[in-house]
Image: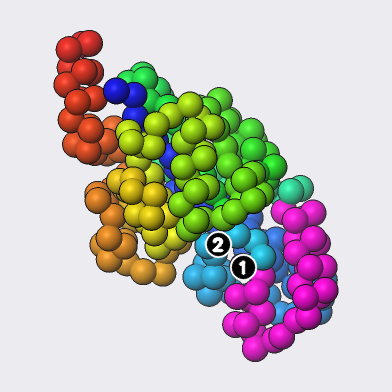
Amino acid sequence: MTPTVVFDLDGTLVDTAPDLIDTLNLVFRREGLAEIPYDEALTLIGGGVKTLIERALVRKGLTCTDAGLASLYQDYLGCYAEHIADRSRPYPGVHQALDALAARHCRLAVCTNKLEALALRLLDALGLRRHFAAVSGPDTFGMPKPNPEVLRRTILAAQGDPATAIMVGDSETDVATARAAGIPVIAVDFGYATTPATDLGADRLISHFAALPDVIDELFPALASQNRHAD
């Protein structure tokens, strides 16, 4: 049995909030709008860039036409692409955990609501792309999380089997996606979810990536046994 481990990106593998928020405030300054304080903007992340902009406008009590939102969205994407890894960094232990899972012959993939090209650009900039057999965004298959089909297709794109797959994420969206796909889910407690991690309803909860390989062994005992025999 070779499990496929599918990761969310923002708030799970990488702390992207600094660049996401910096870009949001840059775009707002261009529009003559006041910046949103970091801690306040942090609660707006999740669901992709367009959702972030919409939530930020609502927070300011502003409305925007569809055309205006589309313009802000395109401006944001252009700025963000140029500054995607200025301050974004993998969470502690990410590289080591991914190497450990690869040594156990796990297939690894990313399923994010960040556009695929931006996800790949970020993973390249941080030296993470080599770990993943597949990377999908909402545009890859024409659907975002929490649609479970995007998770299933990501697993298949990594040449994995949904029957032996697991999701790792930080949010209600990740847990809902995994549940709808019938796949176990591990939540991290250091991401951007507004709901306490203990209340997300995940199968397991971790506070550091160092714990991830052992938790996956708990969920896939046959893999743990296989690894012990290999040793």
Q: Position of residue 63 (x, y in %)?
A: 71, 85
In the image: residue 44, left or right of residue 203: right
**Quadrant (top left/top right/bottom left/bottom right) for the C terminus:** top left
In the image: residue 18, left or right of residue 76: left
Q: Position of residue 222 (x, y in %)?
A: 19, 26
Q: Is residue 165 magenta?
A: no
> Relative to 180, is 159 above or below?
above
Residue corresponding to mark 2: 47
Whether pointer 1 and pointer 2 mark residues with C-beta atoms closer than 8 Å, the reply is yes
Disc 1 marks which amino acid? Thr
Identify which residue is drawn at 33% across, 48% down: 182
Residue corresponding to mark 1: 51
Which segment is the magenta one? 51-80
Task: Give the quadrant of residue 202.
Answer: bottom left
Number of dots carrying numbers? 2
Disc 2 marks which amino acid? Gly
